[in-house]
Image: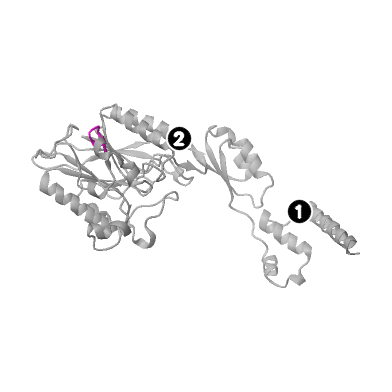
């Protein structure tokens, strides 16, 4: 039986204002083909289906496209809500959708509502005592809102998730003790590395969850962190399918195929995990060098690439943004990384006695701060001429 683990789709997300709808649709088309090629039995999405609690209509359309393509291939989809999702909106009509093979786990009451599949991927009745694989989705649980209702001993993510896992394992042990257990969870697990595009839920350490919380699971399909990573062999983040920042684009994206095989002599072997790299549907590149060096790289970049430029010029170059926009249709961001610092004496002078500094000194310091170096002769001359004209005008208006 094969499960495809993915998460953090963030349907409706933009990258620095750029619409990613086409890239998301290309990913979903690729996912559909992979599901068919690999004979996947269930696709699990570990939270953050949408980027916003109130999804844009385009995002709703993408979710419909995702579900239709998966169901058309005779495959089930199991999704839990993340911290970006509205659990009410994502879980709308979830009980009716269960019958169609769309299993949405968004409420506390869904914790023990596992989806049981046999080794051939067929749905197993809850009352059947045959060994199967039970898949449980843990929705994102905000500790401040649920810890008392759940009976957790503290108001932390670790305590809340521990209580959730206790409920799930107790239900499994009481109803299907021979089942292997898969859980979906949306959390920051200790030992993982985050990315800049994630919303922090770990402030002060109260959001960090130890991997041991999932010890009872044969596989924990994690979401929330956008970088693919294995905390242990059985506790893994799939990561987001698209990069949502320039930093994320430096890490390859993937989805994870998790295969369970029948037990041998009553002993269950651990699931086999296969990493499937996700293609770059819209390239996201950071180019580094002087302005001239970056501009020379334009012919090698795909026409649809989204570009950030980290410029190493020692001084700001006038017109840099316009030149970059002309060279790169997908230019988004420019950063000066190596500007020369203002001279120590001038910097100290700017904090000292202003009466001891001439107007030319003030202009020179301003130029250093804005352009990274002293003003060239023509700029100093234009400043002096403009200052003289203003003084002449003021003098003429006194009488």
> Magenta span covers which residues?
97-103
Q: How far from the left and from the top, in percent, is residue 156? A: 30, 60
Q: Is residue 125 above or below residue 395?
A: above
Say which quadrant the C terminus sits in.
bottom right
Q: Is residue 250 above or below residue 73?
A: below
Of residue 175 and residue 118, the one placed in the foreground of this image is 175
Q: Is residue 322 left or right of residue 166?
A: right
Badge 1: how crowded within 10 Å, few (<14), some, or many (20+)?
Answer: few
Residue that appears at 19% across and 54% down: 166
Q: Which residue is mark 2?
A: 21
Q: Callout 2: helix, strand or loop? A: helix
Residue that appears at 20% across and 48% down: 217
Residue that appears at 15% across and 47% down: 172
Q: How far from the left and from the top, in percent, is residue 19? A: 49, 37
- Residue 98 within the segment the image draws in magenta: yes
Q: CA distance from mark 2 to mark 1?
A: 47 Å
Q: Callout 1: helix, strand or loop? A: loop
């Amino acid at each position: 039986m094969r499960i495809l683990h993915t998460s953090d789709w963030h349907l409706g997300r933009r990258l620095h204002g750029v619409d990613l709808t086409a890239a998301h649709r290309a990913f979903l088309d690729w996912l559909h083909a992979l599901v068919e090629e690999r004979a996947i039995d269930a696709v699990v999405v570990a939270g953050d289906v949408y980027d916003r609690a109130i999804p844009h209509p385009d995002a709703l359309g993408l979710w419909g496209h995702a579900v239709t393509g998966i169901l058309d291939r005779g495959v089930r989809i199991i999704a839990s809500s993340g911290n970006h999702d509205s659990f009410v909106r994502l879980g709308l009509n979830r009980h009716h959708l269960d019958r169609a093979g769309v299993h949405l786990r968004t409420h506390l009451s869904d914790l023990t509502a596992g989806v049981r599949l046999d080794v051939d991927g067929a749905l197993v009745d809850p009352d059947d005592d045959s060994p199967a694989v039970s898949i449980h989705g843990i929705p994102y649980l905000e500790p401040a809102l649920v810890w008392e209702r759940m009976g957790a001993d503290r108001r932390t993510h670790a305590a809340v998730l521990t209580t959730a896992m206790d409920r799930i394992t107790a239900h499994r042990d009481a109803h299907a003790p021979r089942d292997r257990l898969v859980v979906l969870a949306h959390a920051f697990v200790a030992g993982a590395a985050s990315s800049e595009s994630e919303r922090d839920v770990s402030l002060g350490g109260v959001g960090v969850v130890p991997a041991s919380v999932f010890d009872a699971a044969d596989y924990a399909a994690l979401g929330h962190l956008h970088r693919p990573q294995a905390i242990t062999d059985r506790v893994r983040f799939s990561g987001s399918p698209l990069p949502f920042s320039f930093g994320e684009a430096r890490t390859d994206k993937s989805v994870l195929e998790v295969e369970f095989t029948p037990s041998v002599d009553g002993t269950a072997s651990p699931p086999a995990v296969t990493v499937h790299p996700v293609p770059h549907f819209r390239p996201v590149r950071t180019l580094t060098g002087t302005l001239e060096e970056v501009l020379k790289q334009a012919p090698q970049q795909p026409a649809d690439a989204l570009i950030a430029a980290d410029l190493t010029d020692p001084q700001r170059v006038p017109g840099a943004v316009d030149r970059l926009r002309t060279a790169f249709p997908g230019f988004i961001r420019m950063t000066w990384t190596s500007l020369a610092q203002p001279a120590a004496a001038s910097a100290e002078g700017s904090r000292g006695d202003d009466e001891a500094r001439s107007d030319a000194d003030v202009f020179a310091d301003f130029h250093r701060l804005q352009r990274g170096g002293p003003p060239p002769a023509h700029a100093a001359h234009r400043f002096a001429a403009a200052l003289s004209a203003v003084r002449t005008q003021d003098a003429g208006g006194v009488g």
